[in-house]
Amino acid sequence: MNDEKVKGRVQDPKERVTNFNEVELGFNDEEALKEANRCLQCANPRCMKGCPVNIAIPEFIKCIKEGNLEGAYEVISRSSSLPAVCGRVCPQEKQCEKMCVKGVKGDAISIGSLERYVADQAIANNYSVGELAPKNGKKVAIVGAGPAGLTCAGDLAKAGYSVTIFEVLQKAGGVLTYGIPEFRLPKSIVDHEVEGLKKLGVNIYTDVPVGNAITIPELQKQFDAIFVGSGAGLPKFMGIEGEDANGVFSANEILTRINLMGAYKDKSKTPIKKAKKAYIIGGGNVAMDAVRCLKRLGIETHLMYRRSEEELPARKMEVEHAKEEGIIFDLLTNPVKILTNENNDVVGMEVVNMVLGEAGEDGRRSVKEDESSRHTVECDMVVMALGTSPNHEALKNSDIVLTEKGLISVEGTKTSLDNVYAGGDAVTGAATVILAMEAGKKAAKEIIDVLL
Ligand SMILES: Cc1cc2nc3c(=O)[nH]c(=O)nc-3n(C[C@H](O)[C@H](O)[C@H](O)COP(=O)(O)OP(=O)(O)OC[C@H]3O[C@@H](n4cnc5c(N)ncnc54)[C@H](O)[C@@H]3O)c2cc1C
Ligand code: SF4
């Protein structure tokens, strides 16, 4: 019997480098049913152990097999409040699909694509889930409208709390809105999730920098509890000579300009530098998103990473997509100096080849420079995608305790301040959407337990 996994359709690489439309096109009805039918409905489903929010995976797949898509959505929604997002951007290959028993001798079930299929059907057909509890008179403030804050808000609103979100940017969604590009996560999907929250009665105030416009101590006086989900949006740089030159950007800035402010659109008020040749430094999802965005703007794009392809932290699928799109990978190479002209514009980089050493305690191989290999490359744009850390503007004028690494210190999700909870990247450092959602859910539960 042919038991091959059903491959989802994707936009042709030649076509897609000329637009920002979604790359993955998702399953149609026939494909979803065929893939669902591959699931063995295991009595002891290993896949669920790989899911950070413990979605009842065989149960929702069974509903697809039976043609009960509303039921499938209800099952997923019990555990996840952003399934159309997670179905698209969760690293399933390291989570549920990695654990799926079918993967032992063949192809794991495409759980992520099935989740996305169900969630897209729910959006198209306006499925709704769950009853709202009556209002209980308690008020909760949420700082930051990323996946952690949105999830916490949704769970509290459903439980009868009056919830107000304060977001510094002009749009809600956090990284889902300003970081992950349209071609991986259409903004209409994020907008739909945000609209769903508003329908639950959640108030969302944008353009409010907590810490400046209003402080945590002030919020403590006005609300019964506060959840801080302010993320980790502060970019890291290398600290090398020339990094202050014109034409050096953080990936966050490039992505924010493109995704949030639409710099890729004609007549954008915040256009992006029309570079000829750009080097993106880094190898994670952020680097991959930045390099693929710039390619779509017609720039010759190189991804420079100091380790080899095997160590690239980005999702395999993103690496494959980037290669198909013509991104040039300069591996085992690192910049040591950015070269500039008399106007301080970038004209190139001095780079060095890297040599891999033994794996350290964390399992990652060490790297060292091969000094004799120093050479120069020409370019007029350099984008640093080296990771991010939390920006704690929101915590100004509060004496909240931080960890040695500068993250918000929590027990469970409770911070050192009265009635103040926190979760997501602000607590863990840069992580994933599903982990941020899980933290938002946990905090909502702890707030409910304490306030009731
Ligand atoms: C480019 C990029 C690609 C990624 N790709 C993936 C992926 O494919 N899969 C995946 O699982 N994860 C991915 N991630 C990681 C994932 O998006 C994050 O782990 C997740 O968004 C963290 O959620 P959060 O709610 O904690 O923070 P965020 O999403 O960062 O949201 C925090 C929100 O708080 C707001 N805020 C900050 N300070 C204040 C303040 N003072 N006042 C008011 N509001 C404030 C911010 O503006 C933001 O909207 C990616 C990250 C980036 C940057
Ligand atoms: S482990 Fe795989 S085959 Fe078994 S129930 Fe989960 S998805 Fe289906």
Image (cartoon, helix red, strand yellow):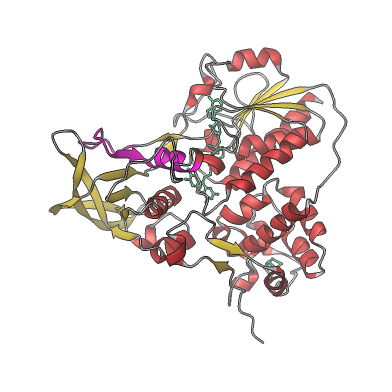
Instruction: Give the residue drawn at x 48%, y 68%.
Output: 12
Q: Is residue 72 left or right of residue 204?
A: right
Q: Which residues are magenta?
A: 237-259
Question: In the displayed structure, does residue 325 sit left or right of residue 219?
Answer: left
Residue 79 image point, x, y percent: 73, 48
Residue occupying image coordinates x 72% and y 37%: 197
Viewer-side residue, 104 vs 432: 432
Report whether residue 25 is seen: yes
Q: Position of residue 332 (x, y in %)?
A: 27, 57
Query: Magenta includes 18?
Result: no
In the foreground, 185 or 99: 185
Residue 427 screen position, x and y as percent: 54, 34
Q: Quadrant of residue 268?
A: top left
In the rendered view, does 383 fall on the left or right side of 404? left
| Residue 127 at x, y percent in the picture | 80, 51
Residue at the far bottom in the pictured view: 1
* Image: 431 above or below 411: below
Within the magenta stretch, is there residue 240?
A: yes
Residue found 54% across the figure and 30% down from its top: 169
Q: Residue furthest left?
A: 372
Residue 400 lies in quadrant: top right
Report the number of numbered marks: 0
Could you say which is closer to the camera, residue 322 or residue 312?
322
Where the N terminus falls, by quadrant? bottom right
